[in-house]
Amino acid sequence: MKQSDTIANLAAAMAAAQSEMGSAIKGSSNPFFKSKYADLGSVIEAVKAPFAAHGLSFVQFPVSGENSVGVATRLMHASGEWLEQEFFIPLGKMDAQAAGSAITYARRYALQSIAGIPAEDDDGNAAAESAPKVITAAQAKTIAALITKTGSDLPKFCEVFKCESIAALPAPQFARAKAMLESKL
């Protein structure tokens, strides 16, 4: 792994972003293995808003070895700090289609790893299907702080977002609620 001279700002921003990130959704099917997986778009979707909210971004560049291809993934912070890692996949077949597939695969796994997000757990999700999907404790703390800071009316907030309390805010509404409150600052 390579990194800038310091990563203190990046580390703090990653901690904040990770508290807001969910899992990458397994929405694509692999008929060969009869399984579902989180595709690259799902992984990007899971990190996009939390990264942007905390001054984080990433780039990925194709790289190649003797019989392999992969990506160099660089995680960057607005301060100029960065982390970078290369990830290679051996090629069984030496053609453009195999290389393209391997690069996409490497991009997905590298981004998921550097962001620290899991793909949703099918077994865990099946067991929890009856449980409501609400924001995390860290997200609830963020919303509570913004309500206080903006002098917003908690009952009105709960009415707008159709929840009984901040902790009961539906997870998909977190980004919208946060953006709405931040717009009042």
Image (cartoon, rainbow, N blue to C red):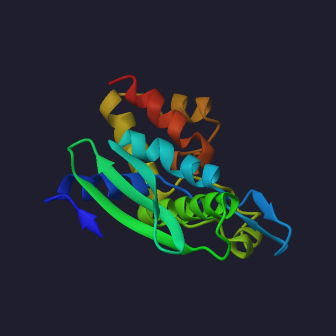
Q: Is residue 38 above or below residue 154?
A: below
* Residue 162 figure quarter: top right
Q: Quadrant of the N terminus?
A: bottom left
Callout count = 0
Between residue 3 and residue 122, name the one nearer to us: 3
- For the point 21% across and 45% down, which residue is it? 80
Q: Is residue 47 above or below residue 180?
A: below
Rendering coords of residue 72 (x, y %): 41, 60
Q: Nearer the viewer, residue 80 or 93?
A: 93
Q: Position of residue 98 (x, y in %)?
A: 67, 64
* Quarter of the image with the C terminus in it: top left
Residue 52 image-quadrant placement: top left
Q: Residue at x 46, y 52 (%)?
A: 20
Q: Position of residue 179 (x, y in %)?
A: 46, 31
Residue 4, image x and y in percent?
A: 19, 58
Question: Taking 108 as reference, is 149 left or right?
Answer: left
